Amino acid sequence: MGVFQVVKLFFNPYKLLRLLPFTLIIPIVLFDALSLSGCVSTSPGIPGLYVVSLRSTKNTTALADVQVRIGYFGICGTDGSGFRCQSSSKSSASDAVTANLFPGLGLGNTTTASNKSSNTTVSSIVGPANAVDVHELVATALELQVQIFISILAGGAFLFAAGMVFLVLHKRDAASPNPDKPRRSAILKRGTYGLLYLSAALVFTASLATSETAGALAYASSTIRNAPVLISEGVALPVLQWMAFGFTLLFTLAVPWIARPGYITSLVRSQKKEQQQPDKETA
């Protein structure tokens, strides 16, 4: 296939429309991966992908720049000298996480947290005198991560991957059906639709639950008098989740056309016919 045929294929509106459902897979994987990797590391943009951030309400200079952010599987902390992030889970101890995110507290330091850069220095403002306040922020953040913000999105991403496997098997079965195995064909078809629709439902549930819960926590912490922690909801991560849901839903709705026998082979055959036409004209 020459360069001219490739350009002609991609600038043909009809063929481009038929290839469009396959391009939806790219943003689905991208947005799911970014949403799940929030606050896991200090890679560019990752600390900005968080569900909620926590600050102390104490009006002190030492705690003015202290902030803790949580994602689904990671946590970040800053004292004004740059973000330090690490992965976190249900088994993460608040003491160890606090020591990793805020080395200036003098609680001991390990190497599991990643610094913003090799030149990042620990702020001397946040010292041992503020250890209790900062530790409470980290402990509250970990509790919210484990008890409240459960990663339903990870389940949706897993079901989408499983649905793609079933879709490939279903396409192969539809291309060469075996009359002796009708049950296998039915299982592959139902599995494809069931997994993909359930994946879209879980991504929608994760997006709605995260947005509503984060908003409720932010409102409550700002209105309750003498609240020890001020919670703010993230912006980028919820947007990525809703975009992931939108593309997942569009792809799922396009599955009946993708799963039709000959959907892909018809594109190949039409391209071969176009290649043969110039040969006949020259002959």
Image (cartoon, rainbow, N blue to C red):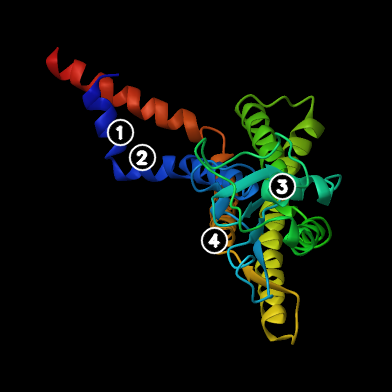
Q: CA distance from mark 2 to mark 3?
A: 41 Å
Mark 3 vs mark 1: give the one in front: 3
**Residue bearing the label numbered 2:** 15
Q: Is residue 227 above or below residue 160?
A: below
The amino acid pointed to by label 2 is Lys
Q: Position of residue 22 (x, y in %)?
A: 49, 39
Q: CA distance from mark 3 to mark 1?
A: 42 Å
Q: Quadrant of the C terminus?
A: top left
* Residue drawn 27% across the image and 40% down it: 11
**Residue bearing the label numbered 4:** 239
Marked residue nearer the N-terminal end (2 or 1): 1
Marked residue nearer the N-terminal end (2 or 4): 2
**Residue bearing the label numbered 3:** 73
Residue 165: quarter of image: top right
**Residue bearing the label numbered 1:** 9
The amino acid pointed to by label 3 is Phe
Left or right, residue 162 beside residue 118? right
Mark 2 vs mark 4: give the one in front: 4
The amino acid pointed to by label 4 is Val
Mark 4 vs mark 3: give the one in front: 3
Marked residue nearer the N-terminal end (4 or 1): 1
The amino acid pointed to by label 1 is Leu
Mark 2 vs mark 3: give the one in front: 3
Which structural element holds mark 2? helix
Q: Are marks 2 and 3 in contact (CB under 8 Å)?
A: no
Front-lying residue, 94 or 105 = 105
Which structural element holds mark 4? helix
